[in-house]
Image (cartoon, helix red, strand yellow):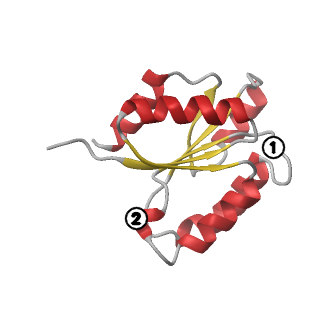
Amino acid sequence: MPPLKHNVCLIDDDNIYQYTARVLLESTGLANQIQSFYNGQDALTYLKDEKNNRTEELPDLIFLDINMPIMNGWEFLEEYQKLHPNLSKPIHVYVVSSSVDYSDMQRSRSYKEVSDYLVKPVNRSKYLELIENLNL
């Protein structure tokens, strides 16, 4: 049986991160669809629009940056907490940041919706590990 492919959502205002993450995720062969958003507000709007429409379009994983314009990662998580119970499938949220500040790591753990905190850069093997764990 071939491994399941998953929908991935990248929420980050950094074009270089978006590009490299997309290339690495595609190289795993386990990403079905990759959605890119450059701020939390656009991603939140997408999730709200899709939550009642097509479950298969919702992401299985979200890689979320902290520092972004319009709506940062923390603001996104505050709104996502309210939306999360109404989503038709579980979504694994990973905070991905270049910050190694202990307070950021601790803050991310205060959200039960956050699976883990990853420090950039994230390599192919880490993406592969996270996606393969969804198939278990």
User: Where residue 132 sits in the image (x, y, percent)?
Assistant: 34, 36
Circle 2 — which element?
helix
Q: Is residue 101 left or right of residue 35?
A: right
Image disc number at residue 68: 1
Q: Is residue 16 above or below residue 50?
A: above
Rendered residue at 49%/77% (across/down): 53
Q: Is residue 93 left or right of residue 96?
A: left
Looking at the rendered image, the quarter that the C terminus falls into is top left
Q: Is residue 37 left or right of residue 39?
A: left
Image disc number at residue 44: none
Rendered residue at 62%/71% (across/down): 48
Residue type at mark 2? Glu
Residue 82 in which image quadrant? bottom right
Q: Crowding at label 2, few (<14), some or many (≥20) Cα neighbours within 10 Å?
A: few
Residue where numbered disc 2 is placed? 56
Rendered residue at 36%/39% (across/down): 30
Residue type at mark 1? Met
Q: Nearer the viewer, residue 47 or 84?
A: 47
Q: Is residue 124 above or below residue 64?
A: above
**CA–CA distance between discs 2 and 1?**
27 Å
User: Where residue 88 sits in the image (x, y, percent)?
Assistant: 45, 70
Q: Point out the residue furthest to the bottom here.
A: 52
Looking at the rendered image, the quarter that the N terminus falls into is top left
Rendered residue at 51%/68% (across/down): 87
